[in-house]
Image: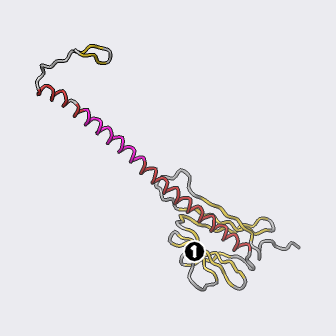
Amino acid sequence: MRMTRGHWERRDETRSAGQRRREAGLLLPECLVYISLFLVITGIASAAYYRSLEFSRNLRRNADEILMALKAGERWRQDIRIADGKVRLENSGAGEVLVVPQGGKEVRYWLEFGTIWRLVGGEGEPRVVCEPVKRSQMIREQRGDVTNWRWELELKPAQKVVHLPPLFSFMAVAGGEGLTASP
């Protein structure tokens, strides 16, 4: 007999080597349970990590698209404000084209294949102003003596389910035609 943990324990020295091995073999199933639990927890954690990584990428892409739309709207407003002639909408094969006269040149905006394009003076290559665009509409509104232009812009969401569609409205008064002289 010997003392362990405050109790007397009787040592059974009559056990055979096979009996001792069977008692030690009970640790293997326990080890397998711990390994399987570790694998399950690691699998759940890695799935959560990759899902959060995807959400982070989507958030970054959405922020970049919103920033692009805001910059495009501010550029459009600036072009409308410095117009020195009558701003007009023309129909072309690609759809409606907004023509803004500026110092003998014309700045053109149009939607084609989900992209808003801007061309200055008819020379050079058109530049991408905003993408991906689902819908774009430029509207002329008469408000009393003031001619106002409004640009309704809807971005094309990358996700299939959208809770809040990315819609923008920009307004500007043209410099060359904004205020009409009253008699």
Where does label 1 land, which residue? Answer: 117
What is the crowding at mark 1: few (fewer than 14 residues within 10 Å), some, or many (at least 20)?
Answer: many
Is 90 included in the stretch rendered in magenta?
Answer: no
**Image quarter (top left, top right, bottom left or bottom right) of the C terminus:** bottom right
Query: What is the magenta range?
Result: 30-48
Predominant secondary structure, magenta span: helix
The residue under the point 11% across, 27% down is 17
The residue under the point 29% across, 39% down is 35
Rendered location of residue 7, percent (x, y): 29, 14
Rendered location of residue 120, percent (x, y): 63, 81
Circle 1 — which element? strand
Q: Between residues 99 and 27, which one lies in front from this camera angle?
A: 27
Q: Amino acid at mark 1?
A: Trp
Rendered location of residue 34, percent (x, y): 30, 36
**Image quarter (top left, top right, bottom left or bottom right) of the N terminus:** top left
Whether 77 is drawn above or below 17: the answer is: below
Q: Is residue 127 left or right of residue 170?
A: left
